[in-house]
Image: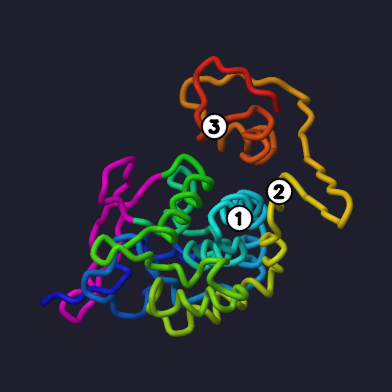
Amino acid sequence: MVVKTRSERHIKNIDPRKSPLKNMVPLVGIAMVGAPTVISLAPSTVYANEDGVANAQSLINQIGTAASEIANQNDLYASVMIAQALLESGNGSSVLSSAPYYNLFGVKAYNGGATVWLPTQEYLNGQWVTMTEPFRQYNSYYESLVDHANVLLASSSVTGQARYAGAWKSQTTSYYDATAYLTGRYATDPNYNQKLNSLIQRYNLTQYDTPSYYTQTTTTTTTTTTTTTTTYQATATYTVAQGDTLWGIAQKFGVSVDQLVAQNNISGELIVVGQQLSI
């Protein structure tokens, strides 16, 4: 019987100080037979140098509001989601997490859709083997975050039970419970929760766990309810061209994808050629 690590489903994060697609960082742990195809495993190395901190903060700035929106709509901790993205992608420096792939969690492509083939290492028959495998390709970090939320909400095709319900907000008292539950289930690394907790504390990621962090705040007293909604004022207009993506347009104008979506009432990140967008 062939026993594979959970890393078989994911490309290894690459040290940005070394050549791309070389010197892969090995992952730790052995997968359970029959484990779902989108389970992730954190790399065994977390960079703590100045460049790593800068990269981490840059990624947080890019995905923080989107993660807050997605997590709070799906009974999840945004802090845990962001920490997982940092850990799985090497602070956003891995090839797979970068443009044009935007795969923050190393999810493999077994069910169709946009795919990129990249080298990864598999633990087969007691040894590491380099193979080329298919990975999901997204149009933006937003899509990667949505897909990750779907993974955490999905039910097992065998038991019909939610695999990661113990990591949901409604089933826990704090993110500590969520990261503890993911350890040994989402990832076989016995220190997975410690690594996530360290990232959450270091970058104050709990600020993104506040409901409606990025668009709306609600204050309620015994007599009145006050609702304040954030709006974005358009300063320019852009016409969508062939090959454009929301991510690319956002980068061009120095705004976030969330701002574009909110400003233009875009549903599902769908844009068409010739569409006028308010920036």
Q: Verify whether residue 121 appears in magenta.
A: yes
Q: Verify whether residue 90 appears in magenta.
A: no
Q: Quadrant of residue 169?
A: bottom right
- Mark 1 / mark 2, whichever is N-terminal: 1
Residue carrying label 2: 214
The residue lying toward the viewer, choosing from 236 and 214, is 214
Q: Which quarter of the image is occupied by the N terminus? A: bottom left
Give the magenta part as a residue range. 108-137
Q: Which mark is residue 18?
A: none
> Residue 154: x percent and y percent?
38, 58
Residue carrying label 3: 267
Q: Is 240 above or below relative to 63?
A: above
Structural distance between the alpha carbons of marks 3 and 2: 17 Å
Q: Which mark is residue 72?
A: 1
> Residue 2: x percent and y percent?
14, 75
Q: Is 6 above or below relative to 228?
A: below
Using residue 224 as the reference point, say whether residue 279 is left or right of it. Answer: left
The residue lying toward the viewer, choosing from 185 and 41, is 185
What is the secondary structure assignment of the residue under circle 2? loop
Q: Which quarter of the image is occupied by the C terminus? A: top right
- Mark 1 / mark 3, whichever is N-terminal: 1
